[in-house]
Image (cartoon, coloured by chain):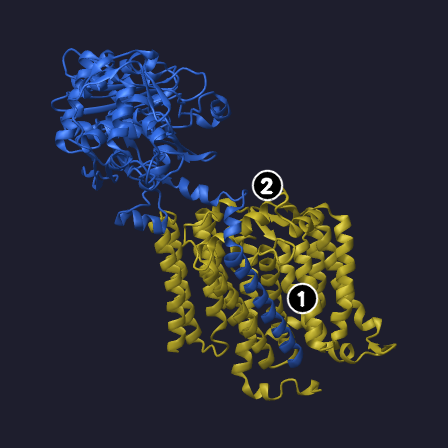
Chain colours: A blue, B yellow
Amino acid sequence: MKKGLRNVAIGFSLSIICLSFGLVYWQVVRSTDLMENPANRRLILLEQRVVRGGIFDRNGEVLAQTDLNDEKKTRVYPKGEAIEPLMGYATLLHGSSGLEAYLGDWLLGIKDATATQALEQAFQLPRRGNDVVLTLDYRLQKVAYEGLKGKIGSAVALDPRSGEVLALASQPSFEGNGLDENWDKISQKPGSPFLNHAFALYTPGSTLKIMTSGALLRAGLNTGDLYNCTGTAVINGQVIREQNDKAHGWVNFNLALAESCNTYFATYGVKAGDKQFLQTAKAFGFGEEIPFELPVKLSTLTNEAAVPHRLDENLLAASAFGQGEVLVSPFHMALITAGVANQGVIMQPYIVEQVRDENQNVLYQKNPEPWLTALSADQAARIKSAMVTAVNDGTASPGGIAAFQVAAKTGSAEPGGDVPTHAWYIAFAPADNPQIAVAVLVENGGTGGGASAPIARAIIESALSQKVGDNT
Amino acid sequence: MKRVWILRLIILSVLWIGLGVLTLDGKANEQILWQAGVFSLLLLIGVAVEKLVAYRGDLYLLPTVQLILVIGLVVLTRIRPAAALKQFWWACLGLFVFYFILYALRDYRALGRYRYLAGLGAVVLLFITLLFGVAQGGATSWLQIGNLNFESEELVKVAMLIFLASYLSEYEEILRIGTVQIGRFSLPDWRTLGPFLAMGGFSLLLLAAQKSLGTALVFFSLYVLVLYVVTERWIYLGVAVPVFLCTGTLGYFLFGHVQVRIATWIDPWVDASGGGYQIAQSLFAIGGGKIIGTGLGNGIGASQVPAASTDFIFAIIAEELGFAGAMAVLMLFLIVVLRAFHISVKAADRFGQILAAGIGILVGTEAIIILAGVTKLLPLTGIPLPWVSYGGSSLLIHFLLLGILANISHAEAADPMHSKHKGREYAA
């Protein structure tokens, strides 16, 4: 009997060892596979235990919040389409995007968790994430949204003094509420509603001339020199044409920018040289990642991501008035504008003002920081004065406002092919004490003065009449 | 004696730390804490009672089971507080049953006298269950008496063990040596083997008719292993394997749900939301636990795994306490089985030896069959994990068996003169 018992005991022990190997197999070897198995709802349910924090605009307007109803959580966006696709979404079915995705760690209370949250995390008590307060001003956002409605394009408004993003609209957008049901319908809509057009790349056209102006000034060219614009110019065998072949006659720098004279900038851009042009581009953030909470596509001068070491003369001439291979996002264009407005210093753009835990303790507070010094104060002032002329006496006049001096520049960029030009309008105001910088782009909208200037003007008017920035 | 208190201290700290965490989580309520208090008190009184009547049996048997029990109680509180409340009540009753059997049963040998009554009673009980039983979870294994539901097969386990031990202690020699020569093998004659086979076959058939296939498997393993242990002849195991394969194949074609079980065992992912749901969820839970687990109360399985409080409770333990906790439970079961075998070796007489070994084998096979099913090492057969799964019948019966085991151990230690002569008459 003893021997029999011993054998059975050995048998049981071996079975237990087999079981422990089974556990090792599932809990160590296959654990990750099991977690990622589509039938396993573990990760989703774990996230579900956290009540996602709310997102507010600078005035406390609710942009996104989670409603709790009988343990059931619904993410609601009271402002609907106006804040999409900036806000993005976070659903079980389709994952997350936009601010909902990039602020996910804050909203779920995972990033820099407070002691209570860490404890709650360890014991998985029902947990509240953090609230995020944006620098966004919903009133401006709404103006931008309404101005763009029905078009394809985007509008970005910044405070040039701090880099705060005041409005960031993109059209077409979508309704964030009940997204799961409408997903298929939305994704089939033309114009990519899920794409934030403010971060997409476009040919900048004449708006880039303010950057080229920087290169001219850096090169020390005499801006008082007169240039006779005949409607076309030939540089190194390449014919540069004015828009509608208009001859501007004798212009100096100021008038050339105000009248948006292509041949002047092509000629003087080449005179300044590719070295100055490329250095200025770098100083304005070309080829550099923009330090922002959301990913912005890198603006490029040529078909390569990095800023090249040299540009041949033909490409330089074309690039000087924003054609050639130059691609810029509306967001970056707004930053360039803000740099001119802020005496040549581009502030780091940001949209998260504050993060607060559920007891309103501030966990994170962003302070303005300079990003790049694109121009000297003097250079910025001279470009500004040309932009003022553009509004008072040039192509940018549709963006003018009686009560404030606006400084602006238009652009009608040829995207290539037989389609209407992209309509650009960049502006800041008031010119002597800039509080807002705006970039508006309407895809195939025609001229900048026609399609985009009214939108920019509406945003600026609304911002200045409400004295945005009083509380900063 | 100090050891005894230290062991109890460990058990109570496991219980109260577990409940403390769950209270923080808001999962344990005041009622449960009160019940746990009563249980703790009873557990300590038990030690005093042991001291009072000079219990001299195995000192580790009961504490090990109590540790398994409190782990089960804590996990059950986390899964279903309402069920845990009842389980605490059953646990208290279980302790009472244990001490009652330990002291009221003067001489466990008396049990042997009722072997045919026990065997017959077992078969009749199963038959009654088949006729009048209530179906739960696909198996007709519940008897309803008044408001009380009782899983009759649990009681049958006790009867069968008594029958087995008594019968085998008497016919051991014949079974071992054999009287009929068939080829190279000498086998016992039919008259000896008859009652054993009849009882075994009949009860297995009844269990199969009730569709309690898991329990049938436990019984089959119990019969074969006890027979092997007593006779030490591999031939009984050798015969058992083809018999098992034949009946298994027969069962596969007879029962639809056996086919489903086998199919989902081979590949649960094909139909992870249908037939494979149970086992897939179980594996997700186990996989989610990783090495140290999600922590008590943090797992997802408790709400996702079907039958989380009964058959699949181990998956929840593996998720929330991780590999570490699951291993601990495995080891505790191994300790219980080996302690039972130890008691068996030391037991004063053949009946006691076989009974103790049988109880150890029963607990071992039950644990291994359900744990292998939950971890997909074997096809799943739903049976409760002793002392852990929710269910009064199983808990009480296993405490009763534990009481008998302690009794055997105590008798051996209290009567050392007797033990000197133990097994002499059977010395081979």
- Which chain does the residue under circle 2 lie in? B
Q: In this view, does B360 lie to the left or right of B32?
A: right
Above or below, A385 relative to B323: above
Using residue A423 as the reference point, say whether residue B97 is left or right of it. right
- A152 vs B104, nearest the viewer: A152
Q: Reading the chain from its start, which is encountered first: label 2 or label 1?
A: 1
Q: In this view, does A110 lie to the left or right of A40?
A: left
Q: In which quarter of the image is the N terminus of chain A?
A: bottom right
What is the x, y in percent for residue B163?
A: 69, 68
Q: Residue at 22% x, 17% y: name it.
A: A258
Front in this rendered view, residue A381 or A116: A381
In 3D space, how far apart are the residues under numbered discs 2 and 1 (Cα atoms)? 35 Å
Residue A125, image x and y in percent?
A: 35, 46
Residue B356 picture quarter: bottom right
Front residue of B343/A118: it is A118
- Label 1 environment density (alpha carbons within 10 Å; few <14, some 14–19, many ≥20): many
**Dot 2 alpha-carbon crowd within 10 angstroms: few under 14, some 14 to 19, many 20 or more:** some
Residue type at mark 1: give it. Answer: Leu
Quarter of the rendering containing residue B415: bottom right
Residue at the disc numbered 1: B222
Rendered view: B248 above or below A331: below
Residue in the picture at 78% in, 64% down: B242
Figure disc tally? 2
Query: Residue B219: x, y in percent?
Result: 68, 62
Question: Which subunit holds the residue at mark 1?
Answer: B
Q: Is residue A87 visible?
A: no
Label 1: which secondary element:
helix
| x, y percent for residue B257 | 69, 47
Residue denoted by label 2:
B273
